Amino acid sequence: MLLNELPNGAHAIVSRVLTTSTEVDPAALRRLGELGFIPGEPVQLLRRGPGGREPLAVLIGDTMFGLRLLEAQCIEVQPA
């Protein structure tokens, strides 16, 4: 399952970061890893932006990030 498929408030564990679109380059994937989206890391999808769209407010560790839908679709998770 991908991070963007989680319901609001759901907890999960990062499985891997992968490219799902030609619009996401290797530098963007590396940036996600640098932010803490690494296998085994717990993550929570807090909420979505207006209308249930972007940005997605995501908590990883003690830090909250706003992710674009395209970025969230690159993060494979397992529900906790």
Image (cartoon, grey):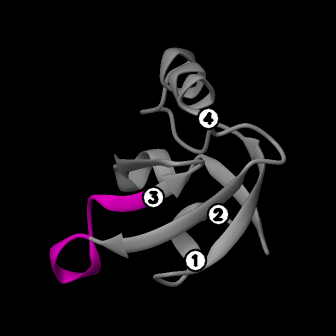
* Image side of residue 5 versus residue 78, left or right: left
> Residue 80: where, in percent of width, then height?
79, 75
Q: Residue under label 1, please give it.
A: 6
Q: Is residue 29 above or below residue 51?
A: above
User: Which of pointers 1 and 4 indicates the residue nearer the eye?
Assistant: 4
- Callout 2: SS: loop
| 50 is within the stretch colored magenta | yes
Residue, x 59% and y 80% (percent of image)? Answer: 10
> Residue 22: where, in percent of width, then height?
50, 32
Q: Callout 2 environment at 10 Å: few (<14), some (14 to 19), or many (20+)?
A: some
Q: Residue under label 4, please give it.
A: 36
Q: Which mark is residue 44?
A: none
Residue numbers of the magenta segment: 49-58
Sequence-earlier tag: 1 or 4 = 1
Sequence-earlier tag: 4 or 3 = 4
Q: Which mark is residue 2?
A: 2
Q: Mark 3: which amino acid?
A: Val
Residue, x 47% and y 31% (percent of image)? Answer: 24
Q: Mark 2: which amino acid?
A: Leu
Q: Closest to the observer: 35 or 2?
A: 35
> Residue 12: where, in percent of width, then height?
71, 68
Q: CA distance from mark 4 to mark 3?
A: 11 Å
